[in-house]
Image (cartoon, rainbow, N blue to C red):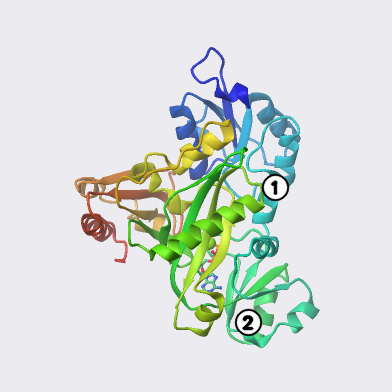
Amino acid sequence: MAELNQLGGSREITLGVMGGGQLGRMFVHAAQRMGYFTAVLDPDSVSPAGRVSHHHIQTSYTDPAGLARLAEVAHAITTEFENVPAPALAELAKSRPVAPAASAVAIAQDRAAEKTHFASCGVPCAPYAVIETAEQLAAVQDQLLPGILKTARLGYDGKGQVRVRTRAELAEAWSTLKQQPCVLEKMLPLQLECSVIVARGSDGQCVNLPVQRNLHRNGILAVTEVYAGNIPVALAQRAIAAAKSIAQGLQYVGVLCVEFFVLDEASPEGQSLGGLVVNEMAPRPHNSGHYSMDACDVSQFELQVRTLAGLPLVQPRQHSPSIMLNLLGDIWPEGGVPAWDQVLALPGTHLHLYGKLQASKGRKMGHLNITGASVEQVRNTALQAARILGIEAF
Ligand code: ATP
Ligand code: MG
């Protein structure tokens, strides 16, 4: 990858990304800041990343001509969403470095494969059963109920999930999900949710961002809080070690986010599973890592650039306590915009908008990072901003 390091030289070095959503846009910004040219492949003519990239290849993710064009202009290629077809990444890898690898992305795309991988790394997940056939459905053990039936593939933001209490509901839910391959997970008593972002280089070096404490509402991330004491230190250390072993086990190159459940300690599950279980992983930067753009000396997107370009990885340092509020389309008033002037009048607010022109319910339009000198100050400011924006307090 030596050619990728010729930053500031006489040649254009171009980094490519599959997908043109907000994660791609923030990757493009980070790459451009470091002097790289960028190429985005996304079918949408107004994708958030496509609009800010030097090259926008507007084809489907599987179009052979589009992939050939991306491999022609980009010296190395990454992805910004996990549902990019793994064969497309494998095709690109024939001619260019691709990180993360198609094999790792393929595992992250399939909940059953993902759980098998977690187990092979010695990291427990929720008790579950794979349901691909009527026989498997009939053989489900009662102790997995109440549970959540999740499609094995293509779920996000809580989509493709049905909560079930009884066998009858389970059978009905599987029909509703068109009898696709699914996993049934036991519903666990959650004390809180957290995530860890790691970046691993091709030399095996692995660094991490601090543990993020996440609040989901309606299956969508709403608030991320990152500061000393957001979760007990011992748990944080275990989560970081688990995330690193999951990356290591995949021989992963790139940025990986691993989401965890912290269980209610008093519950039987909390005791038998040891308090911390892995939920899922995302083979890319993650919504819960956006605070790193303003609260850390290296953001998750710069880490993605560095892993892709073979630049040195250094352990990021968080310099400010931080809270991130997700800005969903729900808070856009009809025909208008939220009261940004009031929000930006609060010290330590950093507004990130993704250039999406249509607000709709549940759509991720942007995020607001809040930094400050103390946890108390950050929490106060975040709660004030939430009140102004009509986001429920946390
Ligand atoms: P993402 O947008 O993170 O990809 P997703 O659609 O893949 O979300 P999950 O992360 O599987 O969905 O679940 C969404 C949320 O539902 C979790 O963050 C958690 O709050 C809740 N949840 C999921 N599985 C369980 C479980 N086994 N027990 C209790 N709560 C759960
Ligand atoms: Mg999730």
Image mark for residue 171:
none
At label 2, counting other C-alpha atoms closer than 10 Å, the crowd grade (few under 14, some 14-19, many 20 or more) is many
The residue carrying mark 1 has its beta carbon less than 8 Å from ligand 1: no
Is disc 2 placed on a helix, strand or loop? helix
Amino acid on which the number 2 mark rests in the picture: Leu
Picture quadrant of residue 383: bottom left
Q: Position of residue 153 (x, y in %)?
A: 67, 60
The mark nearer the N terminus, 2 or 1, is 1
> Does 321 sit above or below residue 92?
below
From the viewer's side, name the closer residue of 124 and 191.
124
Name the quadrant of the N terminus.
top right
Whether the residues at callouts 2 and 1 have beta carbons within 8 Å, the answer is no
Number of on-image labels: 2
Q: CA distance from mark 2 to mark 1?
A: 31 Å
Q: Eyeballing the image, is 259 above or below 60?
A: below
Q: Position of residue 274 (x, y in %)?
A: 52, 74
Which three-letter amino acid code belongs to the residue tagged 1? Pro
Q: Residues within 10 Å of mark 1 (few under 14, many from 20)?
A: some
Residue 219 position, x and y percent, is 49, 66
Can you give x and y, in whole percent of width and height, for residue 150 in the image? 63, 69
Residue visible at 34% across and 45% down in the picture: 295
Image quarter where the C terminus lies is bottom left
Provide the residue designation for mark 2: 144
Disc number lying in front (2 or 1):
2
Which label is found at residue 85?
A: 1
